[in-house]
Image (spheres, rainbow, N blue to C red):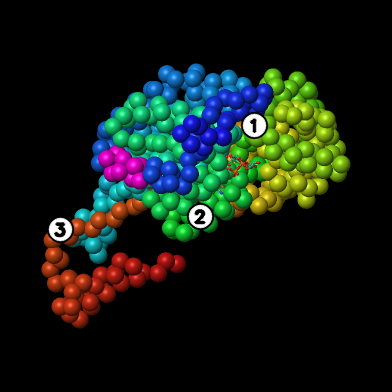
Amino acid sequence: MSTATGQRTFDSLDPATGTVVGTHPIHDAAAVRATVAEAGRAARWWGGLGWAERRRRLLDYKAVVTRDLARIAETVHRETGKPEADAVLEVILTVVHLDWAARNARRVLGPRRVFPGLVGANLAATLEYQPLGVVGVIGPWNYPVFTPMGSIAYALAAGNAVVFKPSELTPGTGALLAELFAESVPEQPVFRTVTGLGETGAALAGDPGVQKIAFTGSTATAKRVMTACAANLTPLVAECGGKDALIVDADADVRAAADAALWGAMSNAGQTCAGVERVYVVDAVYDAFMRELTGRAAAIRAGEDYGPITMPAQLDVIRRHIDDAVARGRAVVGGPESVRAPYVDPVIVEDVPEDSPAVREETFGPTVTVKRVADAEEALERANATAYGLAGTVFSGDARRAVELARRMRSGMTAINSVISFASVPALPFGGLGDSGFGRIHGADGLREFARPKAIARQRFALPGMNLTSFDRGQKELDQLVKIVTFLHGRRKR
Ligand code: NDP
């Protein structure tokens, strides 16, 4: 489609009804380049504002977002189909992160003295983290506020300008977030949105004016984005979803574990990167857990407790995983008939072979596989046997044992006796390993992800007879240094 001025456009649709929610421009490579160039100028202004003023502006933006919570949630609800209450929760969680990023940026990134060591006793050593310039954020549709803001808020707090390319399914939400920012920062286009399809994101990733890309989406697209970034050596933080497991140990609170497994698997129609996709239950509590899980699942229905599948093409993936899992395992709740587009009712399948798509590939739907295991060790081994490594959950009655299992879980985050709880703690970094990507958003690591360390060593006075970085250096100085170093570092520990 195109407007009277020749600007090509696309529509965002309500996935529940197919009706048009909004019409947005398709920004081509030239438009992206112009936006990035403007953002580059805005970045210099924003970076020059200083910590206190940026904090004040970001806290004001937080207040604007909080006051406009209902409007943002309504847009999210219409573009993703998720219940409004879920959209409200998503915005609330975002506000918590905005607040943390604004309040902690100076503490984490600001200049500090570091100990220069005895050999550098005449130096004043300082470390600070400077903004990168323009950060490009390529966001997903499943949490169109919370997920991209995990990069945007932290990048802005670190002193960068941001150009945000929301998913083509949720452009209105992205545009609204940038529009509201201009209420707090009207002087310069510090946070801008470009809209369009995959090519718009590709143009952003390949733009030489962008100093870092923060991407959330599929592993396959992350590889394409990384290739585009390679042209300019643009660094990338990539959050690519997962195949997260929930482990139920023999001494776990089975009711709480079943409640968490159900919510972790089905909420947001299973379209959560850190959602529960696999459950491993220790033999001793397996039957009790399954009674509890299936009993609770019977009361949950798509279209009431959660919304439709936001991306129509995903229905094919979900259907393929269910068909295969049911054929090779045992459906205990739902089955192929649960897919009634655009909705999918809860599907729980047990005893699915570990090499099946429902166990190995990201389903991104309201489905979960459950397997009986001999003990927590077997559960952990199976949980870790995945190419992904985003997050996971442990339910156990023994705190020490649970922490020990969590440490050995091959994932960036682990929740114990609750599900996805780490995402609500802004001080905790969020990100994965393997096919789940690399780099971190949230917390101090998330702030540092959008800054470059700057090291400064200032000589305060010349060390008498110790000018080592000079051609005037003599053998005596070197002998003296060898003595000092031998005294400091030459003693062996036995
Ligand atoms: P994609 O990875 O295709 O898209 C994610 C983002 O990247 C979107 O904004 C998309 O834009 C953009 N994009 C697409 N192609 C390019 C490109 N060549 N260069 C730069 N940016 C690009 O995910 P989908 O939305 O298609 O979902 C597919 C699968 O990804 C899901 O089934 C799910 O498994 C996984 N996923 C994981 C998420 C997570 O939270 N980790 C979130 C969403 C999806 P556009 O939408 O305009 O195409």
- Estimate the spatial distance between the alpha carbons at disc 1 and disc 2, rounded to whole Å: 27 Å
Highlighted range, magenta: 36-47
Question: Is the CB–ligand 1 distance for label 2 below 8 Å?
Answer: yes
Asked whether residue 408 appears in the rendered view, the answer is: no
Q: What amino acid is labelled 2 in the image?
A: Ala
Residue at 29 percent across and 51 percent down: it is 127
**Going from the N terminus, do you reach mark 1 or mark 2 first?**
2
* Residue 427, position as x, y percentages in the image: 45, 37
* Residue 298, position as x, y percentages in the image: 78, 23
**Image quarter of the C terminus:** bottom left
Vertical order, 330 against 126 (above or below):
above
Residue at 23 percent across and 78 percent down: it is 479
Vertical order, 221 against 314 (above or below):
below
Name the residue tied to disc 1: 310
The reply to whether discs 2 and 3 touch (Cβ–Cβ < 8 Å) is: no
Q: What amino acid is labelled 1 in the image?
A: Thr
- Estimate the spatial distance between the alpha carbons at disc 1 and disc 3, rounded to whole Å: 61 Å
Mark 2 Cα within 10 Å, few/some/many (few <14, many 20+)?
some
Residue 460's disc is 3
Q: Is residue 333 left or right of residue 87?
A: right
Name the residue tied to disc 2: 228
